[in-house]
């Protein structure tokens, strides 16, 4: 019989786990800022969907196009944020709720991109004759469709994203309980408040910013990531330091 030492965590993997929370937190803040700026510019330029007459198409749309250009970078940052949030769970990850977490986040991002592409299409279609296009039923239909895609369907996917994250946090304990309960509150607001109001869309990036700031502060203070530890063995026993091997 021969014995050999149990393999330790590779240095490269340990370094990656140390950097990932910081990178994910920074990405979450970047997403919140870029997404919030883009949505704010959209609201200030095009106004509310119910009162939009299309008059903004006759003015300078340079700022509006700039906001459209920010969204792809916001989307990339959000993907990085999701990866960092999942890595934080470590070995305690629940595959069922993690699947819901990833799917809802991906659908949210896809709907945001689709809505942004629709708004960009409106600007491009109105370039030849803004006044005539703004008065057409085509503009009215497209504007309503984009508004519902962003303010209703994308927001509902964001609500499911918050709920799945809250459940994962409560099951694993990688985040404070008050943070999980706050995510549940955000889920209730985003899911059941049926409105296309401007403030509702900003609830989600505000929540992402809050979570990212907390993770960033915890990382800078040197707090360990609970999810990176192996789950305890039954009976509180320590894992064996050596394993037996038969030559």
Image: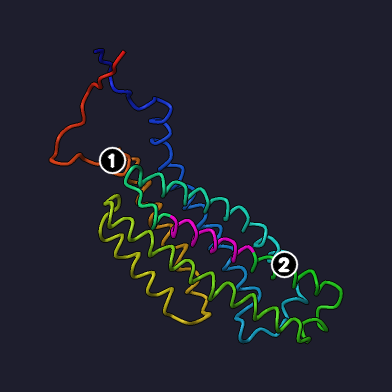
Determine whether the residue tagged by mark 2 lies in a helix, strand or loop. helix
Mark 2–mark 1 Cα distance, whole angstroms, equals 44 Å
Residue 223, numbered label: 1
Q: Residue at x 25, y 22 (%)?
A: 243
Q: Nearer the viewer, residue 73 or 175?
A: 175
Image coordinates of residue 149 in percent, x first then y, are 59, 73
Is residue 234 highlighted in magenta?
Answer: no
Secondary structure category for the residue under label 1: loop
Residue 12 relative to residue 115: left or right:
left
The image quadrant where one finds the N terminus is top left
Q: Residue at x 61, y 73 (%)?
A: 44
> Where in the figure is residue 193, as x and y percent of width and height?
43, 80
Q: Which residue is mark 2?
A: 120
Residue 39 appears left or right of 24: right
Mark 2 or 1 closer to N-term?
A: 2
Residue at (39% x, 56% y) in the render:
96
Give the main secondary structure, helix, strand or loop, of the magenta stretch: helix
């Amino acid at each position: 019989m021969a014995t050999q030492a149990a393999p330790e965590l590779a240095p490269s993997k340990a370094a990656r786990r140390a950097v990932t929370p910081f990178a994910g937190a920074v990405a979450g803040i970047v997403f919140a800022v870029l997404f919030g700026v883009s949505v704010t510019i959209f609201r200030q330029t095009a106004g509310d969907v119910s009162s939009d007459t299309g008059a903004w198409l006759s003015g300078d749309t340079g700022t509006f196009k700039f906001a459209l250009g920010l969204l792809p970078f916001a989307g990339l940052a959000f993907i990085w944020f999701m990866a960092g949030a999942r890595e934080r769970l470590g070995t305690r990850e629940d595959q069922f709720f993690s699947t819901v977490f990833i799917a809802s986040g991906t659908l949210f991002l896809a709907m945001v991109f689709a809505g942004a592409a629709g708004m960009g299409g409106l600007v491009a279609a109105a370039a030849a004759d803004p006044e005539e296009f703004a008065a057409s039923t085509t503009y009215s239909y497209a504007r309503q469709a984009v508004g519902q895609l962003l303010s209703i369907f994308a927001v509902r996917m964001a609500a499911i994203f918050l709920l799945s994250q809250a459940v994962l946090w409560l099951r694993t304990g990688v985040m404070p309980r008050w943070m999980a309960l706050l995510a549940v509150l955000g889920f209730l607001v985003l899911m059941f408040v049926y409105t296309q109001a401007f403030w509702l869309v900003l609830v989600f990036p505000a929540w992402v910013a809050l979570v990212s700031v907390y993770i960033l502060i915890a990382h800078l203070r040197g707090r360990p990531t609970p999810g990176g530890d192996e789950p305890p063995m039954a009976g509180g026993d320590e894992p064996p330091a050596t394993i037996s091997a038969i030559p």
